[in-house]
Image: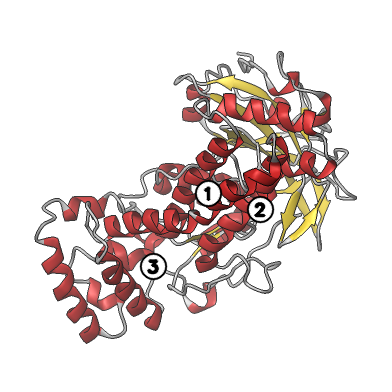
Amino acid sequence: MTLTIPFDNTYARLPGTLFTRQAPTPVPAPRLLAWNDALADQLGITGTPDAAVLAGNTISEGADPLAQAYAGHQFGGFSPSLGDGRAVLLGEVIDQTGQRRDIQLKGSGRTPWSRGGDGRAWMGPVLREYVVSEAMHAMGIPTTRALAATATGEDILRETPLPGAVLTRVAASHLRVGHFEYFAARGDTDSLQALFNYAVDRHDPGATDPLSFLKGVIARQARLVAQWMGVGFIHGVMNTDNTSISGETIDYGPCAFMDGYNPSTVFSSIDRNGRYAYDNQAKILPWNMAQLASALLALMPDPEAAIPPFTEAVHAMPDLIEAERLRTFAAKIGIASPRAGDTALIDDLLALMAAGRSDFTNTFRALPSNDAKDHVADRDAFLDWADRWHARLESEPDAAALMARTNPAVIPRNHRIEQMITAAVAGDMAPFQTLMTALATPYQYPVDQSLTRPPSQDEVVTATFCGT
């Protein structure tokens, strides 16, 4: 049965300054690696998965492929012309809930924004994004989704030749802070206005002006970063071109989950100064929102007069993030209705964990049991903390159930992902399937209990890479 995608495109009808029409570059031998049946059903996609469509060799009826234009601040420096350098937006569908969703091919070849790159992706980052994005979704964290991974049958050159692949990615949209920066930097207020109107219609229909739109994006991003930190996630490249307007996690490059807790943890091989370290993520997002605010000022009748309220909105973000962090971490220790004093209780536990590099995931998961003390180096200090904690829980009757649905038992650990990639490159997709099965229900202990084990000393992953 022919693969049928019910496209209903709107972005392609916007002014041509916002994109370039761009077909994917065909590949020699497309072969399906993974297909997300459940997501396909949600999107109203029917028929048999077709590797030729999912690799970009065949364009489905109704698709209108294009590469989006955007800019971005990368590690603090402004790049005025980035855009989709290795991705093509095939089009949009309306899912079973009535939500509009993008379908994009990532790794689909060169575009006008490739800047000398090959426009391709190798299999490792494609499978990493597939696994991690689906794990994030299962944990209830807003994220882009993975519909398919397709091998291309060709090698691409990084440090060495590596097998190529294409990710079929689904998103509430691919609009980024960098989209707004692109047109603001050019003084193209007509295109900026068209983009703004589109973004409001799609993501903030209640927004009445650029300021209220900005506040909506800020609220979504504040919640998102607190959720990341609640599961020990480190994005790795929180540039403004990787910061979504929809509040979804997007662009899983050198991302990773912490094993031993250290708030200064960095995995990304390109983050040499720790700009996007675990604990800095909550500080960087307000900076990113300031760049969005600056771009939106151009749409105000009197930009100079608009600076104070825009500045106030951005300056309010750290308090929003802290409030979301309190809710997130309070739930992790069984507190459904947090109070101001709970911040000290949370921070004291984290300090104990940091002192002994306690495993982030397993320590929180063990809190309801008597095993928790075994995860902390200073057991006496932990027992003193636990006395305070138990006293606080006397007014929280559902604490154990709350912790069980808040603290995952299994996460996509870095060493398991690396092992999965190595196996997949050799033609063995079994470790991928094992991970996907376990991560589909992350709050339950997996059949393979070894998936909950931290890495041994020789399994520790010290750096992750973008793959470009």
Front residue of this view, candidates 434 and 103:
103
Instruction: Label 1, secondary structure: give it.
Output: helix
Q: Quadrant of residue 56?
A: top right
Residue on which the image places disc 3: 360
Cα–Cα gap, marks 3 and 2: 25 Å
Q: Is residue 42 above or below residue 1?
A: below
Between label 1 and label 3, give the one nearer the viewer. Answer: 1
Q: Is residue 432 left or right of residue 293?
A: left
Point 47% across, 47% down: residue: 136
Q: Quadrant of the C terminus?
A: bottom right
N-terminal of the two: label 1 or label 2? 2
Do callouts 3 and 2 mark residues in contact (Cβ within 8 Å)?
no
- Amino acid type of disc 1? Ala
Front residue of this view, candidates 70 and 288:
288
Between label 1 and label 2, give the one nearer the viewer. Answer: 1
Question: Percent position (x, y) of residue 89?
Answer: 71, 30
Disc 3 residue crowd, few under 14, some 14–19, many 20+, Cα 10 Å:
many
Q: Quadrant of the N terminus?
A: top right
Number of numbered callouts drawn: 3
Point 28% across, 59% down: residue: 330
N-terminal of the two: label 1 or label 3? 1
What mark, if any, has residue 124 been given in the picture?
Answer: 2
Question: Percent position (x, y) of residue 40?
Answer: 53, 25
Residue on which the image places disc 1: 313
Cα–Cα gap, marks 1 and 2: 40 Å
Point 33% across, 52% down: residue: 447
Point 43% across, 53% down: residue: 320
Between label 3 and label 2, give the one nearer the viewer. Answer: 3
Question: Percent position (x, y) of residue 6?
Answer: 61, 15
